[in-house]
Amino acid sequence: MEDPGLAAQIALPLALATIMCALGMSLTPEDFKRVLVVPRGVAIGLANLLVISPLLGFAVAASYDLDPELAVGLVLMAAAPGGTMAALLTHLARGETALSVTMTAVSSVLALITVPFYLGLSVSTFDASVADDVSMLGVVARVFVITIIPLSAGMYWRAKRPVWVVQHEPRIKQVTLVVFVLVVIAAVVSELDIITDHFAELAFATLTLNVAAMTVAYGVSRVAGLNRRQTTAISLELGVHNSTLAIAVATTIATVLATPAAVYSVFMFLTAGAFARLMWARNGREPEPEDLTAARTQAATAAE
């Protein structure tokens, strides 16, 4: 099994840390408190993100009979927390952006547990040859260092310098997008031979996972009685994962594990963007949820 190189050991974790720090600068303690304020929407969203999505990863990998290492990589991608771009697409689709931000924040913290758990389970299930290379304690430590610490640092900086963060928010978002694109390009280049040899099956497998996750999330959310704006947020959160985390964790073990995440990243914004465009028109005909309306009223009152 190919050992990860310098880029995997230093550059990719630093890139992810940059993205997570930027995410932290967009968060406040209220984003975590919303779990208690509107528990039903958050609970349904997290159940889809942390349970249903990884299980779909197992199912899709088995259905396409992927090589063991690629199967593990696909599950790792499915188990990744929500991505920072999901909130932007949710906003553009007139979805409940606050719910999207909360799911991203909470799932990013819980990734400390869920990512190593599903990684270990997939290695065992598919009998991947990376088994000897995977130390769950080591994975937990890596996830903690490259996600929780920079996320906390970003939140701390926002609390101490809120005016600076607000002023530089557009630039921060631009830097985050550039870093994300560079990570995906690096992952694709590093595994170009494998991607070329397995592109068809990986393309169909990742697209199947992406569409299935959004479809199931949409159906579960509607059956549970959530409104369209909430359903939009949850569906997009299932479509736009933090693939940078999947790539960073994968490449510190074996670069081949990052291949499905790299291919997934190429397609996810196309499907999520099409879904966001579809929901934009539908959500325009639905009133805002009560908690969002109340929050805006409270903010307006406090400003007076």
Image (cartoon, rainbow, N blue to C red):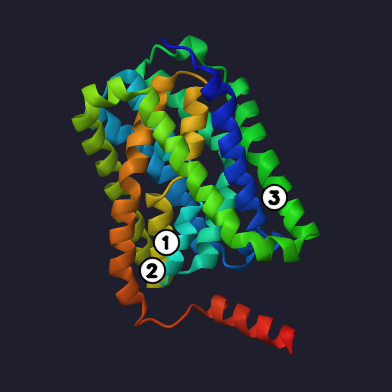
Rate crowding at label 2 as few (under 14), some (14 to 19) or many (20 or more) other CA atoms within 10 Å: many
Identify the residue shown where x is 47% and y is 34%.
Answer: 246
Up the image or down, 300 lies above or below 278; here it is: below
Q: Residue 154 shows which numbered tag?
A: 3
Give the amino acid at mark 2. Answer: Ala
Q: Residue 93 shows which numbered tag?
A: 2
Give the amino acid at mark 1. Answer: Leu
Q: Is residue 206 left or right of residue 140?
A: left
Marked residue nearer the N-terminal end (2 or 3): 2
Up the image or down, 216 lies above or below 301; here it is: above
Identify the residue shown where x is 43% and y is 64%.
Answer: 90
Rate crowding at label 3 as few (under 14), some (14 to 19) or many (20 or more) other CA atoms within 10 Å: many
- Inter-mark Cα distance, 2 to 3: 27 Å
In the image shown, does 106 or 276 lie closer to the viewer?
A: 276
* Residue 176 locus on image (x, y percent): 54, 49
Residue position for label 1 = 89
Q: Are marks 1 and 2 in contact (CB under 8 Å)?
A: yes
In the image shown, does 159 or 239 lie closer to the viewer?
A: 159
Identify the residue shown where x is 62% and y is 35%.
Answer: 146
* Residue 88 locus on image (x, y percent): 47, 61
Specify the farthest residue to the bottom.
304
Asked if residue 26 can be seen in this view, the reply is: yes
Give the amino acid at mark 3. Answer: Gly
